[in-house]
């Protein structure tokens, strides 16, 4: 099969994706999502480039200190994949209301390292019925989780709202989990593959494991809605 045929077969040039957090996970995820040829890519982050984070935020350089990450990411990705429309959004996500700009998205990738941001994404996606992929890393450990509202256990039942308290960040781990987030999102966008939903993919050192999540019997969201 030719490269042209492969590109046509796996086209997502009609999809809109949002990445929340343009740090270690977000930069990795953005590169792969742009490379896949998504139509529109929202890049949301409130923070500026810190020189101490350059080891794992590889699209930024020493001359970028103090500039907004999401705007710089748009600039760098525009050279890489010109057909994608990039929309940088400088905003700190504290609640579901802060994500009103993402209502048109086909999937949201949560790449933040704090419980408040994850909670906001979870609440928004449950309300708007938008699939989300959550990722987190700490040292050589990381997790990725595909959440399908009304179908898979919610992020609370999966334990991924507060699952990682970051003590250290390793560039290679961020690359692996960021790529895994995109992989989960692409499989869903391309084929509506729901087999990966409801499972936490755990990377620990050099090993992968998969945990099948069951909804909490007392969860108000999952009790009446979950089908997987």
Image (cartoon, rainbow, N blue to C red):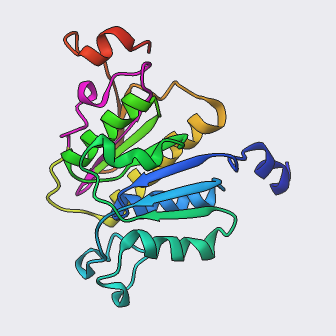
Q: Is residue 95 left or right of residue 196?
A: left
- How many numbered tags mark residues here? 0
Q: Residue at x 40, y 79 (%)?
A: 60
Depth order, front residue of 73/88: 88
Q: Quadrant of residue 118?
A: top left
Please, is residue 84 above or below residue 200 in the view? below
Q: Residue at x 27, y 74 (%)?
A: 53
Q: Quadrant of residue 220?
A: top left
Depth order, front residue of 33/125: 125
What span is colored magenta in the figure? 137-163
* Residue 49 among those drawn in magenta: no
Please, is residue 101 above or below residue 73 in the view? above
Q: Quadrant of residue 212?
A: top left
Tell me, yes or no, if residue 129 can be seen here.
yes
Tell me, yes or no, if residue 180 can be seen here.
no
The C terminus sits in image quarter: top left
Q: Position of residue 7 (x, y in %)?
A: 77, 52
Q: Is residue 107 left or right of residue 189?
A: left
Q: Position of residue 26 (x, y in %)?
A: 40, 59
Q: Residue at x 31, y 41 (%)?
A: 96
In the image as oriented, which residue stretches furthest toward the bottom? 63
Q: Is residue 79 left or right of residue 99?
A: right
Please, is residue 21 above or below residue 121 in the view? below
Q: Position of residue 13 (x, y in %)?
A: 70, 50
Q: Residue at x 32, y 75 (%)?
A: 55
* Residue 155 among those drawn in magenta: yes
């Amino acid at each position: 099969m030719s490269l042209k045929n492969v590109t046509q077969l796996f086209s997502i040039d009609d999809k809109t994706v949002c990445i929340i957090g343009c740090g270690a996970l977000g930069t990795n995820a953005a590169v792969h999502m742009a490379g896949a040829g998504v139509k529109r890519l929202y890049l949301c982050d409130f923070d500026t480039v810190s020189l101490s984070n350059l080891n794992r935020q590889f699209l930024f350089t020493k001359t970028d200190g103090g500039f907004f990450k999401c705007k710089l990411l748009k600039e760098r990705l525009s050279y890489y994949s010109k057909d994608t429309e990039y929309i940088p959004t400088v905003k700190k996500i504290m609640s579901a209301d802060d994500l009103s700009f993402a209502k048109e998205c086909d999937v949201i990738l949560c790449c933040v390292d704090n419980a408040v941001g994850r909670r906001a994404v979870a609440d928004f996606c449950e309300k708007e019925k938008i699939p989300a992929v959550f990722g987190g890393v700490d040292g050589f450990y990381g997790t990725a989780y595909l959440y399908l509202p009304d179908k898979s256990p919610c992020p609370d039942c999966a334990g991924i709202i507060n699952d990682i308290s970051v003590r250290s960040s390793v560039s290679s781990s961020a690359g692996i989990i960021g790529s895994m987030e995109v992989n989960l999102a692409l499989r869903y966008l391309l084929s509506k593959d729901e087999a990966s939903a409801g499972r936490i993919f755990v990377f620990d050192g050099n090993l992968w494991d998969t945990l099948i999540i069951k909804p909490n019997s007392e969860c108000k969201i999952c009790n009446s809605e979950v089908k997987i």
